[in-house]
Amino acid sequence: MLDQVGSTETIGEKTYRRIRSDIIFGRLTPGQKLRLERLSAQYETSIATLRELLNRLLVEGLIVAEGQRGFEVMPVSPERWHEIAAMRELLECHALRQSIESGDVEWEGRVVAAHHKLAAMEKQLLSGDRSQTETWKRYDWEFHHALISCCGSKALLDAHSAIFDKYLRYQIIAVVFRGEAAAREHRELLKAALKRDADAAAAVLVKHIRDCVQYTLKSGALAP
Amino acid sequence: MLDQVGSTETIGEKTYRRIRSDIIFGRLTPGQKLRLERLSAQYETSIATLRELLNRLLVEGLIVAEGQRGFEVMPVSPERWHEIAAMRELLECHALRQSIESGDVEWEGRVVAAHHKLAAMEKQLLSGDRSQTETWKRYDWEFHHALISCCGSKALLDAHSAIFDKYLRYQIIAVVFRGEAAAREHRELLKAALKRDADAAAAVLVKHIRDCVQYTLKSGALAP
DNA sequence: TCAATAGGTAATTTCAAAAATATATGATGA
DNA sequence: TCATCATATATTTTTGAAATTACCTATTGA
C-alpha cells in the first residue's frame, strides 16, 4: 500500500545522495582528489556506478573534472562565495516576491509550521547544543523553501535548491552560527511574509544573506 | 604548440555534445524514449559510457529518468515554456545590468562584433535562406552572451548558458523566426548597451523574450 | 468476462576486467 | 648539474557481459 521509498532505490541513487551529502557537509573537503578505487572501496560500489553519479555532481558544480585526470571536490574561494551568495539573493528574492503575492492560507500554514520547527532548533542551539547540525540546516532549508513554495515555477524552485546547497557547503565549512541575529531575521521574515509585505521581506532576506557572507569572511575560514 | 582541442577529448565528451545538440535541435524529440541499446548502436559507444553522459543531461534538465525505467527526452509544455522564459528573463536582465555598469571598451568591442555577425545572418535569413539555423542560433547566443559577459559572475554566466539552451530548444521546436521584429530588438539592445542605458536595455530584453513566447504559443507548435 | 498470477522476454542496472592515458622513476648525454 | 627521453607504474576511460528489474502474454480460477 505505502510507497516504500528505499525499496526501489538503486544503489547508484543511494551512493549519489551519500557522496553529495559528504561534500556539502565537508566530510569530503574542498579540492580533495577523488580517486576512483578509493571511493569504490569506501562506498562499496563499482567504478562505473561511481562515474555515473560523479558526472551528476560535476554538472551540479559540486565537483570538477580536469581533462582525463579524474575528479576532485570543487575548491572554495571568497570570489566563488560571493557569486553563490549573489545568485541565492537573486533567485530567492524573486521567488519570495512571487510567492508572497500568490500564497494562500495553505501556504501560510506551511510557513508558520516550518518556522516553528526552525525556531525550536535555534533555541536549542543558543543553549549550547551543537550536536544536530544536519537537522538544523534541514529546518533552515525547509523554512526558506516554504516561503518561496508558491512562486509558481518549478524551474525556479529547482534552481534555488541547487544554489542553496552550494551556499550551505560554505556555511558548513566556515562553521557559521550567527546565533540570535539569524534567528531574529527569520522571525522578521515570517512576520513580513504573513503581512504580505514583499519589499520588507526581500530587504530582510538580502540582509540575512549579506551579513552571513561578511560574518564568514571575517572568520577567515576561507582564507588560503 | 597549439592546443588541439579535439585530440585529448574523450569519446564520452564527444558523444555528450552530440546527444545534447540532438536534443536541443529537436533531432531527438520531446518525450522520446532513449533505449540504451539503440543509442549504443546509433552513437557507437558502450552503454556504460552512454549512462555517464545521460546522467549529466539528467541534471541539466534536458532528459528525465523515471525510476528504473530508463531515460527519455524532457517533454515540452506551455507551462514549462513560460517558466524557462521567465528564468531567462530574470538571469539575463540581472546580468545585463551588471555588465552594462562595469563593461569596458574591450566589452563594447565584443558586443559590436557579435552584433555585426548576428545582423549579417539575420539579413540572410530575411532574404529567405533558412539553411544555417545552427550558425544563426550560435550567433544569437554569442551576441546575448557578449552583452552580459562583464556581469562579473561565472556562476551567473553558467546558469544563463544552461537556461539559454533550454530556451533555444523551444524556439527550434516551434520553428520560430520572428524576422525583422527580432532583428530590430537586437539593434535596440546594442544601442542601449553602448549608451549604458541599463533600464532601456532591460526593457528591450523583456519585450524580446515575452514577444517570442507569445509568438510561439500562437503558432500552436507546443499544443498537445 | 474479468482479475490475478506465473512465466518468459526485454530492458535497465551493476560489475570486473581490458584499453588508453597520465604520472612517476631512472638512465642517458651534453 | 640539468634537461631529455624511455620505461614502468598508477589512474582513468571504455568495454562486454552478468545480475537485476520491469514489461508483456497467456493461463487459471472465479
Image (tube, coloured by chain):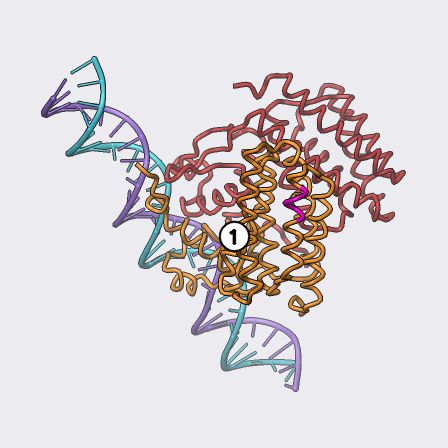
Chain colours: A orange, B red, C cyan, D purple
**Residue B15 makes an appearance in the image:** no
- Main SS category, magenta section: helix
Give the percent coordinates (x, y) of residue A25: 52, 60
Q: Residue at x 69, y 61 (%)?
A: A78
Find residue A127 and report its horizontal and vertical position in percent. 55, 65
Q: Chain of mark 1?
A: A
Q: Position of residue B161 (x, y in %)?
A: 66, 41
User: Which residue does the image show at 53% across and 65% down from the upper left?
Assistant: A130
Image quadrant occupied by the N terminus of chain B: bottom right
Question: Would residue B59 be found to the left or right of residue A185 on screen?
Answer: left
Foreground residue among A75 and C23: A75
Residue A60 rendering spot, x and y as whole percentages: 56, 49
Residue nearer the viewer, A143 or A10: A143
Q: Foreground residue, A164 or B105?
A: A164
- The answer to whether residue D2 is above or below residue A206 is below
Q: How many marks on residues?
A: 1
* Span shown in magenta: A188-192
Query: Is B34 within the magenta?
Result: no
Image height of A206 relative to B128, above or below: below
Residue drawn at (42%, 37%), measured in percent from left and top? B66
Amino acid under disc 1: Arg
Which residue is tagged 1?
A138
Q: Residues within 10 Å of mark 1 (few under 14, many from 20)?
A: few
| Residue A161 left/right relative to B90 | left
Q: Nearer the viewer, residue B195 or B106?
A: B195
- Tell whether B109 sits left or right of A178: right
**Helix, strand or loop status at disc 1:** helix
Is residue A104 in view?
yes
* Residue found farthest to the right: B195
